[in-house]
Amino acid sequence: MNRQNQTSWEAFHLGITDRELYAEDSKVVDNLLHDLATNEIVHVAQKEGGTQIKLIIDYADMGQALFKPMRFPRDRETEPNHFYFTDFERHNAEIAAFHLDRILGFRRTPPVVGRVLNMTSEIYALTDGYLLRTFFVSPANNLCFHGKCGYYCDTAHAICGHPDTLEGSFAAFLPPRNVAQRKSWAHPYRRSYHKRRKASWETDPEYCDKYVRHTPPYNEGRRFGDLMDLAIFDFLMGNMDRHHYETFKAFGNNSFIIHLDHGRGFGKAHQDELSILAPLTQCCVVRGLTLQRLLQIHNSNQTLSELMKESLLSDPISPILTDDHLLALDRRLGIVLHSIRECTRRRPFQDVILYDNY
């Protein structure tokens, strides 16, 4: 039930179900995106842990967001010699992932919006502790900071304004863990995160049947279908960095997989990393509703890239993706559908299409 003085954050939290973070026809998300982009900020702190710097933003109305700052222009892609686990995170990838998730009909990614900050008045003046001590003025007379994290948190990789203007992505916080506990799961197709070692699924073509399909929590409920959805979602973005995922404890095995942390997506517009599709191509299963949506997009008058471009125009710091990254979505959608067709050639159709009604 909506209260008259309810904030957009509270309305968003109360609308979460075991199927999705928000309803398809929800007006709450638009209100929340507006508040994320415009509401007064009262405190800033660095989020502990993680490989790269992220800030926790506190708003005057008690809302919170996770801020990922801009590091480089939209057209700068992943360094060729970077491994997936040392790649820079991209703030625009977080924004694009939210829009893609919504277009695909998943609605499992928390709302994310772009915003331009004044670093002096909206970060430096509102923070304290170690983060404050990492601020400095660069030789180009720009205000910079670097914080403390596993990678790229030093003077040579500092976040700098122009001279103190900085854009970034603002992702709405999920309900506090004392209100809605979440459980972290190791992704069964996680990579080795090692320069030379491969994961088991990369060398064993029977990995799915041996270790996933018949193993809890994938042998019942919606989790197996969600795993396939996540593989398709990540492949479309080119996101190789999926080592864990989270679910809501209150919903048990009926909780959807929450789509979080997409900063390493949209890094290579001209390379399609087929290994990301391994859950789909090895298990040869796709949710019927997901296939229906993919075919609907594929056969519609608007391509996926056109749908994304139109959706991203609403963001305050648009354009979000380059044309090359947008066109990559159309190419990758074709690859996903081709992979599903190949599965139906190898296995009975009824074994490939999962009708779990989620």
Image (cartoon, rainbow, N blue to C red):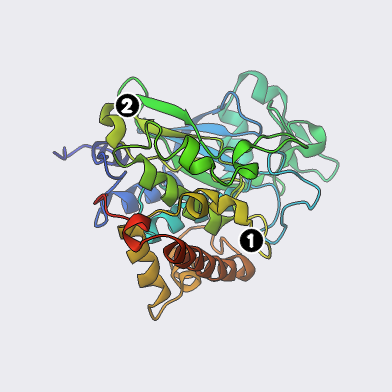
Q: Is the residue 177 above or below the residue 294 in the image?
A: above
Q: Is the residue 234 above or below the residue 208 in the image?
A: below
* SS class, disc 2: helix
Foreground pick, 320 / 192: 192
Foreground pick, 13 / 31: 13
Left or right for 70, reference 32: right
Foreground pick, 42 / 338: 338
The picture places residue 3, in percent across and down from the top left corner, at 16, 37
Q: Which residue is mark 2?
A: 249
Which of the two labelled residues, at mark 2 and mark 1, occupies the earlier sequence position? 2
Q: How busy is the neighbourhood of tag 1: few (under 14 within 10 Å), some, or many (20 plus)?
A: some
Residue type, mark 1 in image: Asp
At x 35%, y 37%, the residue is 219
Left or right for 161, reference 125: right
Q: Is the residue 152 above or below the residue 236 in the image?
A: above
Residue type, mark 2 in image: Lys
The residues tagged by marks 2 and 1 sit, at their Cα atoms, a distance apart of 34 Å
At x 35%, y 63%, the residue is 349
Q: Which residue is mark 1?
A: 272
At x 72%, y 57%, the residue is 76
Left or right for 51, reference 45: right
Looking at the figure, which quarter contains the N terminus? top left
Outermost residue toward the right?
139
The picture places residue 86, in percent across and down from the top left corner, at 72, 39
The picture places residue 274, in percent across and down from the top left corner, at 61, 57
Left or right for 184, reference 275: left
The picture places residue 173, in percent across and down from the top left corner, at 41, 35
Q: Are marks 2 and 1 in contact (CB under 8 Å)?
A: no
Q: How busy is the neighbourhood of tag 2: few (under 14 within 10 Å), some, or many (20 plus)?
A: some
